[in-house]
Image (cartoon, grey):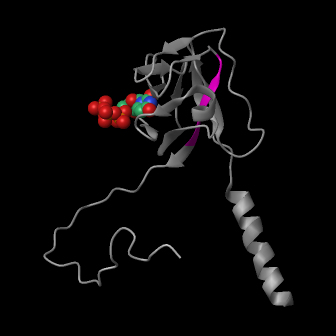
Amino acid sequence: MGAFWATHRYSLEVEEKNMSTQQIKIKYFDENLVKIDKIVQGDWLDLRAAKTIELKKDEFKLIPLGVAMELPEGYEAHVVPRSSTFKNFGIIQTNSMGVIDESYKGDQDQWFFPAYALRDTVIEMNDRICQFRIMKKMPTVELVEVESLGNENRGGHGSTGTK
Ligand SMILES: O=c1ccn([C@H]2C[C@H](O)[C@@H](COP(=O)(O)OP(=O)(O)OP(=O)(O)O)O2)c(=O)[nH]1
């Protein structure tokens, strides 16, 4: 028992030491845009609409998020709606998840939220509509073509049942 806890505590300490703070250069496009908050809860950062946008039911618009960033080397960012976004504004994100490439870092590379409205709606400037986090990019991969993968089939959608 004692040995287990000693090992466990050691691995937690190592993890904590390796979690260094990463800096992200950020440019705001409008001085009236509320700056991104330090993380209060959780580890995603909320983003705000950079202008007031009106959408009619079934309309699509790109909502500017008012920021451009230079991500740390080897990282990309993922942007998803907040859980409450559909309830509050009746919009969904058309690409389900936005991927911000590491190379998207020019002065005019403003982040945007592609929105589809399921009802008439108004999103006010500075409303928090989505959230992002940075993720390590995947390693370089090579696709190797084969005739057979040599594995058993797992079975497709729903093959494990519902109970
Ligand atoms: O929700 C999103 C998705 C993308 N982008 C920006 C960042 C990204 O780096 C760039 C291009 O996105 P993506 O590669 O997904 O678009 P594409 O349709 O494949 O176009 P491209 O030919 O520019 O790659 O647009 C956003 O601001 N918000």
Q: How many marks?
A: 0
Picture coordinates of residue 151, whole percent (x, y)? 28, 83
Q: Which residues are magenta?
A: 126-133
User: Ligand 1 is in which quadrant of the figure?
Assistant: top left
Secondary structure predominantly adopted by residues drawn in magenta: strand
Question: Which residue appears farthest toward the bottom when viewing the image?
Answer: 1
In the picture, measured across the screen, residue 46 lies left or right of residue 113, that is right
Q: Is residue 12 in the magenta section? A: no
Picture coordinates of residue 112, whole percent (x, y)? 47, 24
Residue found at x 62% / y 41%:
83
Picture coordinates of residue 128, whole percent (x, y)? 64, 26
Residue found at x 16% / y 73%:
146
Q: Who is closer to the viewer here, 76 or 156?
A: 156
Locate residue 139: give its quadrant: bottom left
Locate residue 67: give its quadrant: top right
Residue found at x 13% / y 76%:
147
Residue found at x 53% / y 76%:
163
Question: Which residue appears farthest toward the left when viewing the image?
Answer: 147
Q: Who is closer to the viewer here, 145 or 159?
A: 159
**Where 23 sits versus 110, above or below?**
below
Using the rendered image of the protein, determine whether residue 69 is visible from the camera's viewpoint. Answer: yes
In the picture, measured across the screen, residue 159 lies left or right of residue 150, that is right
**Where 136 sits versus 28, above or below?**
below
Picture coordinates of residue 108, whole percent (x, y)? 43, 16
Question: Which residue appears farthest toward the right when viewing the image?
Answer: 2
Locate residue 18: give its quadrant: bottom right
Q: Is residue 128 in the magenta section? A: yes
